[in-house]
Amino acid sequence: MEVGRFLDSTSATPAKSANPNSISKVRVVVRVRPFLPREIAAGNGDQTPRNECYRLDSFFAQEDNNVGRIFSREVCPLIPGLFHGCNATVFAYGATGSGKTYTMQGTDEMPGLMPLAMSKILSMCQSTGSSVELSYYEVYMDRCYDLLEIKAKEITVLDDKDGQIHLRGLSRVPVKSLSEFYEAFSCGIQRRKTAHTGLNDVSSRSHGVLVIAVSTPHDDGSGDFVTGKLNLIDLAGNEDNRRTFNEGIRLQESAKINQSLFALSNVIYALNNNLSRVPYRESKLTRILQDSLGGMSQALMITCLNPGEYQESVHTVSLAARSRHITNFVPSAHKQETPKVKVDMEAKLRAWLESRGKTKSARRIEAFSSPLLGKTPSSSIANVKKPNINLSSMKSKVNTNRSACTAKERKITIPMRNIFDNESVVDSNLENVQFAAKDNKQEGNAGGGGSIFESNTSLHDTFPLCIDLLLTMILPRFK
């Protein structure tokens, strides 16, 4: 397949370095991997004649060292911006078996973009005094797992008030040399989910994300640091299960991968058409790429193509060409603080009510907002005198209160005779209650030293008896 026929790439100029307060387009480049030995021996490539044209930013043909050329032209210009607090994202997109993992990870003889980027960053840290931290995680079955932990640990994707993505629980490993990087990176590669499929011997079953955080001290000597992040993402490839013959768990993995990539295409479509709602939350992958697609990060999309699969290459390039129109806003490293102005909401509400002619409601708000309501001055509390309790006078008051209560109890029997037919039963029951109350009074007087609360409890004990008697007489009437 002659891929160069339907790709109209612009001049392969290097990407400009991060410029504060600038508008940056998503830069899209294409890498065509060479034929594998088994593909050359089979010789059954798709030779369907077709002529289409797509405009991209750069094109890298089937050279053996095109990964090194991609790094020097496209990725390397993004690194200086990290030391000024800018973020950048590089992600490889393509079908399964198109060389995405080889482009990002590489081999011992031919390092990929991840080792090359770390080597460049470490060399620049020696002159700037910056520190580097490494994080590595995967998105497997729409869940995020930390690859630098010995035991699989799920991490949570969160948004802050500014819409920035944060990963709670993600570990950070300080890196000071390239050997320390390879030690941590190789452990993460071994923990990443891979499996054999019908189209690929070692197929990635998850999206791998390597995060390199660079902290640089300010030049003013204040001791503050500015942090920039470089996200290197190896996306899993979309799969045709009719060709891979996936079954069981492999079929479930393939469904999740295709679902996340379909959500990515929906995000790209929404951004290109300026829709009011961009479906970032349809997948964990799109939430992670939210800052890179229409966000505040410089983005580079490396489209990987299989030279033996024409139809898959056309589908991949068409999506990549649409991604080229997405605009990102790259802010400055020094973020302006939100002015801390105290807003009087009561005054604003009062003014709004008065503008609508609701003066009475505004006056009510003024009354409720008065400082005299709900507040007792401490001076007035201190001036209150404590009452002197005299037991002899209190006993006399209790006796008068008891006589008043008995009078009230006698008045209760009058409406009962108008309601119920069995007048004699009601009067006799109430009289029994009154006699019981009198007996309690005599016992209280015999005590001599009883307090007010003892006499009050005897009255309260008789009141539930009255209610029970009333209920026993009323309920049978409604049965």
Image (tube, rainbow, N blue to C red):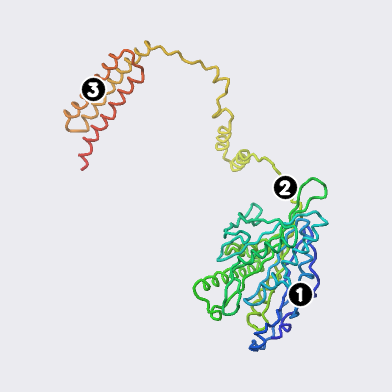
Q: CA distance from mark 2 to mark 3?
A: 76 Å
User: Crowdedness of circle 3 by 10 Å Cα count: few (<14), some, many (20+)?
Assistant: some
Screen quadrant of the N terminus? bottom right
Q: Which residue is painted at 63% across and 76% down in the image?
A: 95
Residue 262 appears in view: no
* Residue under pointer 1: 58
* Residue under pointer 3: 436
Q: Is residue 268 above or below residue 180?
A: below
Q: Which mark is residue 89?
A: none
Camera-nearest label, 1 or 3: 1
The picture places residue 333, in percent across and down from the top left corner, at 76, 54
- In this rendered view, identify the residue nearer to me: 189 or 251: 189
Q: Secondary structure at mark 2?
A: loop
Q: Which mark is residue 337?
A: 2
**In the figure, is residue 98 to the left or right of 407?**
right
The type of residue carrying mark 2 is Glu
The picture places residue 184, in percent across and down from the top left corner, at 67, 61
